[in-house]
Image (cartoon, helix red, strand yellow):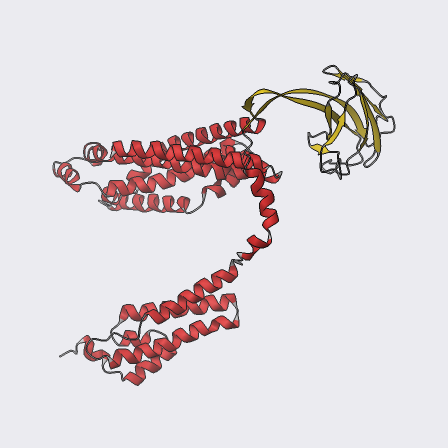
């Protein structure tokens, strides 16, 4: 007569089981008939050892040692408890493991809240401009002219010209210079007795400030006849972006006068925000539409209840399911970087990236909806001899149209938010402008972009929720 499992576990003495647990954590528990407990202990101790060895800090080795000791104690308690073994308190290893996980995580991430206080001035320099969003501005009238200057000088520099732009006559002397050299700019035809901003513009359109240590606007007031004369120094960074600093190229000095008028208009950055938001919504809508259409066949091919009737369809099911999981496991931001390399900057690579991710995400959700439908109609049509297409047409589609529509709308909501991040890698939309403003430290524009994105997401969430409620 064969012995029962309990009698087999009693053939080992408590001391033997404790020794075996000391050699291999969890083995004593397994020999005591506690398979799940033994497996859990082995995983806990093993993961603690791997983590501490990887982090390689001697102080943390106390955790796997403590878990190992607890494991031996637990084996002893299982024998001592007799008929209803409970073992040692499970809270001890859980607490030790969590202390290790959070402690090493704290150190690995270099979590340092004090840094926020230490960099308070830096934080204030960012947050204060954000309290004044740049979306609407007062109406202004602008009067502007410019004159060209060659930097550096060529062997045959151009003759000095008196440029006439917008009625402003401007002359520069000399008409070429090297970096850090001084020029004299004279002008007439300006608004009389009015401050005039003087700026430098490189050949690629990069504006340079000329006041202070080249970090503030140079302001010169015109006289009563609308004339002015000022010294201008070629900025030291004028040739920073030049492919060949020795190649003479035409730079410009701009003279700009602005005066405030009544009323308000959308600022220049505000127009960029509206353009970016429109691109973002269009990008998300097109990606969702194309992705949903392409995801529908994947949803059917990845549904277990439709595709496991015979070996051929079972293979198709495994392939479709695997493909969806592979694509879904890669973030759309990575796809966007790849498509930007392939097709260049703009909304198109962002649309391709979100479309690909949408196909995988909706394909998975669609398949789960199909797997959760009422099997009664499917069995009834199969019982009458209906083929696969007839099953789908008459038993599946009537049940899935409302949830499919709700999931597609919800995915559009997600894609609107995703397309903002896609823009950071050149995928177009509001994210592209947002990244540029962060690079040039224009935090007023950044604040306006944040507000616009938040409003769009809130409105999208509100209307999509209402629409999903009606469909369900």
> Viewer-proximal residue, 21 or 180?
180
> Viewer-proximal residue, 21 or 310?
21
Residue 427 in sight from this viewpoint: no
The quarter of the displayed image where residue 165 is located: top right
Quadrant for the N terminus in the image = bottom left
Judge whether 327 appears above or below 108 on screen. above
Residue under the image location 14 percent in, 40 percent down: 376
Give the tally of numbered discs.
Answer: 0
Q: Viewed as shown, does residue 119 lie left or right of 431?
A: right
Q: Viewed as shown, does residue 305 lie left or right of 168?
A: left
Judge whether 148 appears above or below 415 on screen. above
Residue 260 in sight from this viewpoint: yes
Q: Viewed as shown, does residue 411 lie left or right of 472?
A: right
Q: Position of residue 307 (x, y in %)?
A: 25, 43
Q: Viewed as shown, does residue 363 lie left or right of 356?
A: left
Q: Position of residue 279 (x, y in %)?
A: 48, 29
Q: Position of residue 455 (x, y in %)?
A: 43, 33
Q: Position of residue 217 (x, y in %)?
A: 71, 33
Judge whether 211 appears above or below 60 on screen. above
Extreme top residue here?
167
> Viewer-proximal residue, 262 or 241?
262
The quarter of the displayed image where residue 411 is located: top left
> Viewer-proximal residue, 423 or 237?
237
Quadrant for the C terminus in the image = top left
Residue under the image location 43 percent in, 32 percent down: 456
Extreme right residue here?
155
């Amino acid at each position: 007569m064969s012995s029962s499992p309990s009698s087999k576990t009693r053939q080992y003495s408590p001391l033997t089981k404790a020794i075996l647990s000391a050699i291999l954590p969890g083995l004593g528990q397994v020999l005591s008939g506690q398979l799940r407990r033994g497996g859990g202990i082995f995983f806990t101790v093993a993961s603690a050892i791997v983590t501490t060895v990887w982090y390689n800090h001697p102080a943390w080795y106390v955790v796997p040692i403590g878990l190992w000791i607890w494991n031996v104690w637990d084996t002893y308690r299982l024998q001592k408890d007799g008929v209803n073994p409970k073992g040692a308190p499970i809270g001890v290893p859980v607490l030790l493991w969590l202390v290790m996980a959070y402690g090493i995580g704290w150190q690995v991430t270099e979590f340092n809240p004090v840094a926020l206080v230490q960099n308070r001035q830096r934080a204030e320099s960012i947050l204060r401009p954000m309290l004044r969003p740049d979306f609407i501005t007062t109406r202004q009238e602008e009067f502007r002219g410019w004159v060209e200057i060659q930097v550096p000088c060529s062997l045959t520099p151009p003759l000095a010209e008196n440029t006439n732009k917008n009625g402003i006559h401007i002359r520069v002397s000399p008409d070429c210079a090297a970096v850090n050299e001084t020029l004299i700019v004279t002008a007439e035809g300006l608004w009389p007795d009015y401050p005039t901003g003087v700026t430098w513009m490189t050949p690629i359109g990069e504006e340079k400030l000329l006041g202070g240590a080249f970090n503030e606007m140079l302001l010169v007031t015109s006289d009563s006849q609308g004339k002015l004369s000022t010294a201008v120094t070629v900025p030291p960074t004028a040739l920073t972006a030049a492919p060949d600093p020795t190649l003479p190229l035409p730079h410009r000095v701009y003279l700009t006068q602005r005066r405030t008028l009544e009323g308000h208009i959308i600022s220049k950055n505000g127009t960029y925000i509206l353009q970016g938001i429109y691109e973002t919504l269009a990008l998300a809508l097109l990606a969702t539409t194309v992705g949903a259409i392409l995801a529908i066949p994947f949803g059917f091919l990845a549904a277990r209840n439709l595709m496991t009737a015979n070996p051929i369809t079972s293979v198709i099911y495994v392939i479709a399911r695997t493909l969806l999981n592979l694509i879904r496991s890669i973030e759309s931001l990575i796809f966007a970087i790849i498509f930007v390399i392939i097709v260049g900057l703009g909304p198109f690579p962002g649309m391709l990236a979100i479309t690909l991710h949408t196909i995988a995400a909706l394909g998975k959700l669609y398949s789960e909806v199909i797997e959760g439908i009422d099997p009664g109609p499917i069995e009834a049509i199969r019982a009458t001899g209906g083929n696969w297409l007839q099953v789908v047409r008459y038993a599946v589609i009537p049940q899935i149209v409302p949830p499919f529509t709700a999931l597609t709308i919800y995915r559009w909501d997600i894609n609107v938010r995703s397309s903002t991040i896609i823009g950071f890698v050149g995928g177009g939309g509001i994210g592209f402008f947002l990244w540029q403003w962060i690079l040039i430290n224009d935090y007023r524009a950044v604040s306006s972009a944040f507000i616009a994105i938040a409003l769009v997401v809130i409105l999208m969430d509100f209307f999509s929720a209402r629409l999903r409620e009606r469909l369900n």
